[in-house]
Image (tube, rainbow, N blue to C red):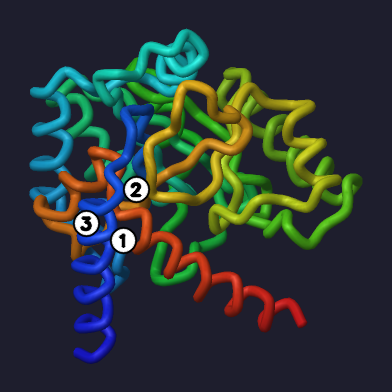
Amino acid sequence: MAKQGIGAAVKVAAAGADALRPSAPGLVILIYHRVGGHTASAVDLTTAGFDAQVGELAASGRLVTLDEGIARLEAGAVADWPVVLTFDDGTTDWVSEALPVLARHRAPATFYVATDFIEARRPFPGEGAPISWDGLQELVASGLATIGSHTHTHALLDRVDGPSAAGELDRSIDLIGERLGVTCTHFAYPKALLGSPAAEAEVRARFRSAAVAGSRANPSDGDRYRLHRTPIQVADGLRWFRRKASGGMRLEDSARQLVNRRRYAQAGS
């Protein structure tokens, strides 16, 4: 209960900060992980909740593919707040729960895959059953999915050298190409942590875009290799979701990243 209370207080504070410093129009990229509400994870949305969010965005006409969003960034055409849906990791609910919702609303999405979990049938933390390559192929066949890389083993690239990063990226790219027959041109950093300078150079050499943290809209003059994304949580409901879909709640993400950096630093020490 205390943790929930702190989370709610942070959301209120973030909304207040937005009021004092409104976000300028830009490309909004939302992060989802799981759909279905089958676990206690803070990012495992109910199917009904996910449907309500996607339906509202689809009705607004703001949803675009990641490729279109980047093209609009480069053209400076983001005054209408276009939105990109993205998913991280690679769990079975992408097909069983998320895809029917996306198909119903004809909503495109990008799926960043940590390929080792799929290849080795290794579960994700928090009861996350890995999707199969056949499941990913079903996403591709829908015509709604763009498949991106999330490294091979979900390695944190802020603590690796260039060769190690290259190995993670190339293995992921190769598996996606071999198993799905698609060219992987987009990347999301695990845990949204920017890589070391050497790792970032490897990312820039291989992809058209890369995504990090930062709950805010991406301005037209932003770096497409440091795209800001906004995580969607069960606790957001529609109230806080709407703020996030409008480029808000930056303070909440800053607080989360501070906590995460300390946690991952301790884990790696």
The reply to whether residue 12 is visible in this rendering is yes
For residue 105, the mark is none
Q: Name which residue lies at 24% across and 91% down.
A: 2
Seen from the viewer's position, the closer of residues 139 and 234 is: 234
Q: Earlier in the sequence, mark 1 or mark 2?
A: 2
Estimate how packed mark 3 is, as few (under 14), some (14 to 19) or many (20 or more) residues with alpha carbons within 10 Å.
many
**Where does the image place residue 138, in percent across and percent down from the top left?**
38, 27
Instruction: Determine whether the residue tagged by mark 3 lies in a helix, strand or loop.
Output: strand
Can see residue 34?
A: no
Snapshot quadrant of residue 266: bottom right
| Amino acid type at image mark 2 | Tyr
For the residues bearing labels 3 and 2, Cβ distance under 8 angstroms: yes
In the image, taking residue 47 as reference, residue 38 lies left or right, namely: right
Quarter of the picture containing the C terminus is bottom right
The residue singled out by tag 1 in the image is 43
Farthest residue toward the top?
75
Indicate the position of residue 233 as horizontal and vertical percent values. Answer: 27, 59
Cα separation, mark 1 vs mark 2, equals 7 Å
Residue at x 10% of width, y 53% of height:
239
- Residue 209 is situated, as x and y percent measured from the top left of the image, at 60, 28
Q: Quadrant of the N terminus?
A: bottom left
Q: Where is residue 166 shown, x and y percent of the image?
A: 83, 41
Q: Which mark is residue 45?
A: 3
Query: Looking at the picture, which amino acid does disc 3 mark?
Result: Leu
Q: For the residues labelled 3 and 1, say whether their Cβ atoms are less than 8 Å apart.
A: yes
Distance of label 3 from label 2 (alpha carbons): 9 Å
Res. 153 image quadrant: bottom right
Quadrant housing residue 63: top left
Contact, mark 1 vs mark 2 (Cβ under 8 Å): yes
> Residue tagged by mark 2?
32
